[in-house]
Image (cartoon, rainbow, N blue to C red):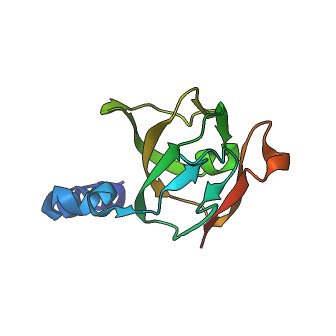
Amino acid sequence: MRWKRWMGLTLAALLAATPVSALDLTRKRENLPELVLGNEEGNDYVVQNRDIELESGRAYRLRIVAKGRQEYKFYAPEFFRNIWINQIVIQHIEIHGGGPPDHFEFDDPGEIALEFVSIKPGEYPWSVRGLEAKGMTGKFIVK
């Protein structure tokens, strides 16, 4: 019993001595290249940066940008389940929550920023539901 108490006190002392900023992985996040769906020239099915590489345990900001005139339903369920999401930002409104989203839907051109820490290595596909045959797919590669 004394051993458990000693370990608890030791852990508490270590945490107290660690700067708060050292515990916040999101402070040193890296901006990823924008994942762009469609373009302003009228090609609604082009994708810029369809495959994105990340490292496990690192913090990132990903901007998913819809520039085309289609309705884009962006699905990446396996990826969303294997990252820790700090926040989702839409038009300067921050969304914080306890679980992963099902998908993002763009009815009009716009941007969604996702701030997260990658957790589990693997290859995670993403797609725009209904437009896969038009090439609107890609993957997140977490090493």
Query: Looking at the figure, which quarter contains the N terminus?
Result: bottom left
Name the outermost residue toward the top: 107
Q: In percent of the image, x 64 and y 60: which residue is there?
A: 50
Name the outermost residue toward the front: 41
Residue 79 relative to residue 31: left or right: right
Residue 82 relative to residue 59: left or right: right
x%, y% of residue 71?
Answer: 65, 30
x%, y% of residue 52?
Answer: 58, 65
Q: Quadrant of residue 32?
A: bottom left
x%, y% of residue 118?
Answer: 51, 59
Q: In percent of the image, x 70 and y 48: which residue is there?
A: 45
Q: In percent of the image, x 47 and y 63: which residue is there?
A: 33
Q: Is residue 91 visible?
A: yes
x%, y% of residue 62?
Answer: 46, 53
Q: In percent of the image, x 41 and y 59: which residue is there?
A: 60
Q: In which quarter of the image is residue 70?
A: top right
